[in-house]
Image (spheres, rainbow, N blue to C red):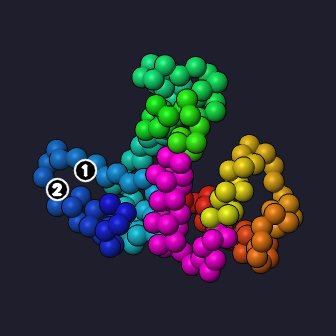
């Protein structure tokens, strides 16, 4: 839905014209894109239902995951058969999760003067996952990083997407 121009106007119109008892279900994977296309608040017309990644028990039941598998590879059902070979798993996540988020969601809607730097910031954040990483350390590891304002802007874009 988030790729429809003025999608919130369309939803408001559909909602207001709906027959008695009809429910509308809208799905979108990008909160960043959904917020970008909103021109109507839709106040009183929606309920947000979050569908997170699969839980440990779901991954265990469906794919036989052990706790160590879940901690390392997460709740992504798509590449679950690839966990025995980390490189294909990593490529799957990069090609089907990370790159589409950056190229379609972030670069499509926000001003990014240095797309390669944005991708490198994402890569660096993934490398230090679960750790505190200072701006200074990031600037030291990123070539052509510019300044902390640019870096902060890119981190905010990635966080929102």
In the rendered image, the vertical position of residue 63 relative to residue 137, given as above or below: above
Whole-percent x, y for residue 43 in the image: 39, 59
- Tell me where the magenta segment starts and ends, as one range: 91-118
Left or right relative to 65: residue 140: right
Residue tagged 2: 18
The answer for how far apart the CA atoms under marks 1 and 2 are is 9 Å
Give SS at disc 2. loop
Left or right relative to 19: residue 12: right
Whole-percent x, y for residue 142 in the image: 77, 67
Residue 161, numbered circle: none
User: Within 10 angstroms of label 1, few (less than 14), some, or many (20 or more) residues?
Assistant: few
Residue 145 location, quadrant: bottom right
The one nearer the camera, 89 or 121, is 89
Left or right relative to 139: residue 98: left
Whole-percent x, y for residue 87 in the image: 58, 42
Residue 111 shown in magenta: yes
Residue 44 location, quadrant: bottom left
Identified at 52% across, 59% down, the residue is 99
Identified at 25% across, 50% down, the residue is 24
Q: Are marks 1 and 2 in contact (CB under 8 Å)?
A: yes
Whole-percent x, y for residue 93 in the image: 52, 47
Residue extending farthest to the left is: 19
Identified at 62% across, 58% down, the residue is 159
**Looking at the figure, which quarter contains the N terminus?**
bottom left
Give SS at disc 1. loop
The mark that comes first in sequence, 1 or 2, is: 2
Residue 24, numbered circle: 1
User: Within 10 angstroms of label 2, few (less than 14), some, or many (20 or more) residues?
Assistant: few
């Amino acid at each position: 839905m988030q790729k429809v121009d003025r999608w919130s106007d369309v939803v408001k119109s559909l909602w207001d014209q709906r027959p008695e008892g009809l429910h509308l279900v809208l799905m979108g994977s990008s909160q960043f894109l959904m917020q970008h296309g909103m021109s109507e608040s839709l106040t009183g017309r929606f309920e947000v239902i979050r569908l997170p990644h699969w839980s440990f028990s779901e991954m265990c039941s469906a794919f036989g995951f052990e706790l160590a598998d879940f901690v390392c590879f997460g709740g992504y059902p798509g590449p679950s058969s690839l966990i025995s070979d980390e490189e294909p798993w990593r490529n799957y996540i990069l090609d089907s999760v990370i790159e589409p988020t950056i190229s379609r969601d972030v670069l499509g809607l926000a001003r990014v003067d240095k797309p390669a730097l944005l991708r490198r910031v994402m890569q660096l954040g993934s490398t230090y996952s679960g750790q505190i990483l200072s701006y200074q350390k990031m600037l030291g590891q990123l070539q052509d990083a510019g300044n902390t304002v640019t870096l902060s802007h890119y981190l905010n874009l990635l966080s929102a997407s």
